[in-house]
Amino acid sequence: MPEIKELQYLKGVGPQRAKLLETELGIKSIDDLLHYFPYRYVDRSHIYSVRDLRPDMPYVQLRGYISGFQTIGEGRKKRITATFADNTGKMELTWFKGLKYVENKFSNKPNTEFYVFGKPVFFGGKFSIVHPEIDEQNPMNEMKVNGLQAMYNTTEKMKSAFLNSKALQTIMYAAVKHLQEYPQPESLPEYLIEKYRFMRLNYALRNVHFPVSQELLKSAQNRLKFEELFYIQLSILRKRIHRENNTGGLLFPHIGDYFNRFYKNNLPFELTNAQKRVLREIRSDVGSGKQMNRLLQGDVGSGKTLVALMAMLMAADNNYQACMMAPTEILATQHYLNLSEMLQGTGVNIALLTGSTKKKERDEIHSALRNGSLHILIGTHALIEDTVQFQNLGLVVIDEQHRFGVEQRAKLWSKNDTPPHILVMTATPIPRTLAMTIYGDLRVSVIDELPPGRTPIQTYHYYDNKRESINNFIRTQVQSGRQIYIVYPLIQESEKIDLKNLEDGYEDVKKKFPEFNICMVHGKMKPAEKEEEMQKFVRGEAQIMVATTVIEVGVNVPNATVMIIENANRFGLSQLHQLRGRVGRGSNQSYCILMSPYQISQETKQRLEIMVQTNDGFEISEADLKMRGPGDMEGTAQSGLPFELRIANLAKDEHILEFARKVALEILQDDPRLEKQQNSLLPVQLAKMTHIRTDLSEIS
């Protein structure tokens, strides 16, 4: 047959289906189709006889003849039944949908042998299969039914147009047949295929859609997963190496009085080994003459802010200014108050700039920035305004950077002729596989120790029927001089989900604890009102704070020892972990209590159990990735992944990702520009990979 250039001319497609494949799945060509991979496989390697059937069997495959079609009932109860027989017995087949199609397709072929696939049900003394999958014997079906059958994700629109998984499989068979006559050019360099004994591309594509055996399927998947992850890593690492080799950076050669005075006189506690290690990494970066682009990961309370402050003091010691941008006014204010207290007596000039800063104070800040007398500026999005001009910006620290857009962050870089050093921080621990991909163009530092004296938070999960004993516990804690957070998921009543809203919760808490002062904070309050309520709690005037997740970041009250999370089943793992991090900041034992209704799913129960079992944010983030997938992870869902994964799975393919990254790094260290003849295919393949949106992962 002649080579097919357009998808619509492939057997089984046509113009309407081609349009549907493009609009629903983004499939525009035969190559796109071949790279639309199955999400699972059903084992059809065994053929059962009717006499082998048992009531507890899962899906089975039989081979025999179909006859005796009957239409029974009317209206919604209308159905078609038929008799299936092989040489060992008979059973019934039943259809409730697509009756006309079934009758036209199968009723006039009494002497044709069929493969029947489905779940057997024993009812009324006989076996039956409802809506069986039926295939007539032919070469395509022989390939399909004698091994592993691929299952493809489809959409409701496709299903309503009869373009379901089975129809996709038929089209895929035509694509694989076309591939055998017109093979695709190899997409990995020959030396990599030989060195690592990869299955060749065309054989891998055939075996991933129509696997002959489990072994060949695994080899095909490994080849295709490696290729996908390899090119993602090659793209990210190539960009990083190019930047590091070609972009000059500000030089901080000295550790001077500001840093040393702070270290000697003001350090609030002995640095952990992890903090010392990260400071050495930062010191190496800013002393290299190349721009620093570093991600600082650390669990809640691990001391990231202290490390960031000491990095900003390195800038001040070298006559550069530094700024720290936080996503909310509450968090920016908290940073400012904490850092101001730590910097007392050091001579370092620090200021706060937010949307609430008064004009007179704002003008003073602008003037001090321009003349260089202001060393450190803490703020919100207000920092990126055009009116904010630094004399000599040397270091930018971004806290919870996933909450800022790329353009917002980039405005800060442009505030100096030579791009400043960049340190981005996150308290949402990121699984290693995500860190290697979303932030793969950054150097990564991890603070994996908590400061000394921190007592691990004890976490418990209780159902609503334990409310009375929880209230007694709250009362006991407050009477001991402690403070309590009670967090609700919603602000206003929702028609869709039956949750206590914040206002009802607030009134309920006031009734139950009339002897205590209660404050309330939520995101829809005016900033001044919110700040006033927050300060009541900070000053200890209110013993209980009822709040939404607005307190997830930015509140540091060491005296608060209990975090009650209402309807904890409505929160993700990362968010629960962030909320829990609001307590445990003092020396007293702290508690996190997860409340939920009794009727929750098994997966939700498992999620809450993980919170009870561990305080390790990285362990929690790995579990979150496995349970929810990368696209829904806290902190990544807002911006999406910087690439589209077609076959690899970050939760399951960590070893392939690490191997792919290692291979990509070795190639780039040997040939940074990919100019060698043996690597000539690599830039060509990278140029084709339009599904990688690396701009989302760029920090500068």
Image (spheres, rainbow, N blue to C red):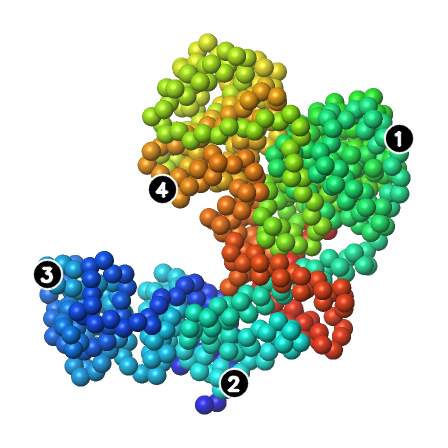
Q: Residue at x 89, y 39 (%)?
A: 254
Residue at mark 2: 182
Above or below for 130 versus 684: above
How many tags in the picture? Answer: 4
Q: Amino acid at mark 1?
A: Asp
Circle 1 crowding by C-alpha within 10 Å: few under 14, some 14–19, many from 20: some
* Separation (CA) of disc 3 from disc 2: 53 Å
Above or below for 121 versus 530: below
* Separation (CA) of disc 4 from disc 3: 35 Å
Q: Which mark is residue 574?
A: none
Q: Which mark is residue 257?
A: 1
Q: Nearer the viewer, mark 1 or mark 2?
A: 1
Q: Are marks 1 and 3 in contact (CB under 8 Å)?
A: no
Mark with earlier residue (3, 2): 3
Circle 2 crowding by C-alpha within 10 Å: few under 14, some 14–19, many from 20: some
Residue at mark 3: 125
Q: Secondary structure at mark 2?
A: loop
Q: Amino acid at mark 3?
A: Gly
Mark with earlier residue (1, 4): 1
Q: Residue at x 84, y 53 (%)?
A: 248
Q: Which mark is residue 601?
A: 4
